[in-house]
Image (cartoon, coloured by chain):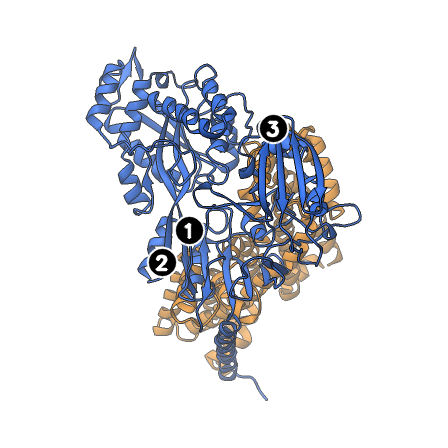
Chain colours: A blue, B orange
Amino acid sequence: MTVNRRTFLQGAFGAVGLVMAQGALSKLVYAQGASGTLRVAIAKPAGNLDPQSHYAIWAIQDLMFEPLVKYGRGGQIEPCLATDWKIEGGGKTLHLTLRQGVTFQDGTKFDAAACKWNLERWMGLDQFSWMNCSKYFESLEVVDDYHITLHFNEPVLALMQELSYTRPPRFLSPMSVGADGKFKEPVGTGPWRQVKADDTESAFERYDGYWGDKPSYERLEAKVIPDPRSRVAALRSGEIDLVGGFWIAPLTPEEAKQLEAAAVNVVVDPGNVTLVMAFNPDRAAALKDSQVRKAISIGIDRAAISQVLYHGYAKPAGNLFSSALPYAGKQHGAPVRDAAAASALLEKAGWTGGPIRSKDGKPLTLEMVVSPDAVPGSRIIAEVIQSEMKEIGIDLVIRSVDHASKHTDMLEQKYDLGFFLTYGAPYDPFGSIVGLCLSTFKNDVEGKLVTDPVNLDPLINAATAATGDQIEPTIQKVYDWLRDNDAIAPLVYVPSIWAHSNRVQGFTSPVTEYDMPYENIVLAAE
Amino acid sequence: MVHFISKRLQQSLILLFLASVVCFTLVVSAPGNVAVLIAELRGAVATPGYVEQVAEEIGLNKPLLMRYVDWFGDAVSGDFGISYRTGQDVSADLAARMSITGTLIAGSAIIATLLSLALGFLGALWPYKLPDRVSRGLALLGASTPTFFVGALMIYAFSVHFQLLPSFGFSGPETWVLPWLTVAVLPAAVLSRVVRIGLEEAMSSPFVLTAKSKGLSRTAILFRDALPNITPLFINALGTQVGLMTATAIIVEPLFSWQGLGDYFLAGVRFRDFMVVQACLLIFLTFFILVNLIVDLAVLLTDPRIRRQWS
């Protein structure tokens, strides 16, 4: 047979047609294969799932590994692998009753011995000293097969919240480590058992020996899709069922709006993380004056930021924490922009003239450091604030940096104004108050939102030392001090955004950004 | 010929050494403390002691020269260290990902070659007529459309709208089509102009007049006489485009969720994962140098004038 131009072109077009036809066919087969399978997007491979390691996606670990207690809505602590607990000795002793009839996915029994083996893998180690229960750990006593007692040398603040964290407190089968005691494979007590994991996906099958309510579908696949636009396209084309979550595969408000316009189900939860603006009076002398800080705060149009930049999904913030968190304090409305009042405050503080105000011959110029990698959307928010500041006579210079440089700059206080995100549930309120506001707590990652060793530290120390009914009034004093001194400027409560296909029914947003929201989902028949 | 190859190999090795110095310097001179970033990735709140431990663990406290010597020595023996971000062996990750990027570049190069030859010949067969104008227009469109936009359009058209092809993944020929086409568009556009102009120049050569006087048709002359003449030129241009495809892979792989070297490099850059970035840069540069070497050899084999020059 001779190959001429015509036969070559016919062959080439035929080959392309065949590939496309095979693609269409395989999609049909794929869709049928997806029956009984929830397909979730994840932005990166799940990573090393050892609960005592720090690399994995929290939500993937959440599928397999369970804690002693769970963090419920509004901060309620709910039983999980522990059915009962009692704190005694002024917060220094914890008695735990373990759940009976629980087995790890490899058949190993969960009992006091397994519990002890797990807790001793991390409690008391320096690496985990950022957790109070590890920092103050003294000893562990096995009472019987299903009762253990933990002793601490200091009262542990938010002890039960800490035990609900995804890592390191979750439980791994003692049989799933090598002879050297090092993690080998992910085997937990949770409802999902990992059957496959590589750089493209992690697949899980329902663990039928699970002690609790089992999922109504048999399989869960977490597909790695790094590009946000591709995640949106995959959801729209029906290749995945669920996308969202700050640490899983974040959706921006813009993307959520596009999906809504394409009739895709979008679920927005108010969330429990706050975007806050920090002032650095140590670098910018003008910010030492609370009138200037207040002028900046009321010069910002939070409602516009919420409506325009977050497409109405975010709520303007008037507090460090939203009411979704426990001990969030008395809730105040967000300040309404008042440019005239802001200008008057600046005049009163001695900053006069225009278009950029000055004092003693020095212009009122402030530098704002932003990192869109660390705080998504922060560059645009900064630009909006920049134009609003100009209206009241402040020259705001924006310096955009990458994630690593942002950390260095914040730590070394190379900024006048900067954005911070609070840690959110289950870490807050104490996580952010201690980590970001207590001067004596060394936080070498994010830097400090605000510190005042003389006035603020005693209030925080009192709040963290309080127990029972005393917690609320003492922590309120911290919030009052922050508010009375305009020490920070909360901007918006960052929403938790999810989108799902029509196959997914009964979806509810997860309680924390670290959980996978699989629990209430029912998959509709194809 | 042997002399030519040995000279080019020597030059390539020197270039590779210089490239390793450049990529190491570039990566380590970036601002920001990577130890803090890693500490943050590993835990919710990191203590100063832990940040210091991380800095020690990844060798940040050593002098720069020592760090370079350590890294280069290990790299030469195939050990690219451990990823700061994932804790996994970088060499193993590279080995797993290389075939993915290789598939992307090989497939795209073949498509780009076929498309460019088709468009170039279309224009040359009917010069200054409708097919020529159409191929010129397509080339202009292809060359001036950014790759990420081409990819987004492909996904929207073939995955979201017609639902014919998957929008992500690397699990079979149907998942290869869109990434191949996305990467191939720009090189195809550029190469089609190389073919078209090369053919036009060749067609104005004296040997074409001879062929015409022998009674050969324009099509026969184009394929039999002009095509071999533009081959060295085409190989040179193709080599450059294949080299540039590594840069395109950085954009296209994450878009289609291909866990290749481009995706690995991008993740490394975002998280200041020194080991990954340095290893990827070195591989990209080695690939570029290797492609150039192959192109030189191919040109030597296809162009008798250069062969004579080195004989």
Q: Chain of mark 3?
A: A
Location of residue A43 in the rendering, given as x and y in whole percent from the top left corner: 51, 52
Q: Nearer the viewer, residue A387 or A206?
A: A206
Location of residue B175 in the rendering, given as x and y in whole percent from the top left corner: 53, 67
Q: Residue at x 33, y 62 (%)?
A: A262
Location of residue B129 in the rendering, given as x and y in whole percent from the top left corner: 35, 73
Q: Chain of mark 1?
A: A
Q: Is residue B178 depicted above or below A357 in this figure?
A: below
The residue to which callout 2 is attached is A259
Q: Residues within 10 Å of mark 3 (few under 14, many from 20)?
A: few
Mark 3: secondary structure: helix
Q: Nearer the viewer, residue A472 or A294?
A: A472
The residue to which callout 3 is attached is A89
Q: Residues within 10 Å of mark 2 (few under 14, many from 20)?
A: some
Based on the displayed image, in which of its 4 quarters is residue A208 positioned? bottom right
Q: Residue at x 40, y 62 (%)?
A: B153
Residue type, mark 3 in image: Gly
Residue B181 shows in the view: yes
Q: Is B293 left or right of B153, judged from the image as shown?
A: right
* Of pointers 1 and 2, the one earlier in the residue sequence: 1
Location of residue A136 in the rendering, given as x and y in whole percent from the top left corner: 63, 29
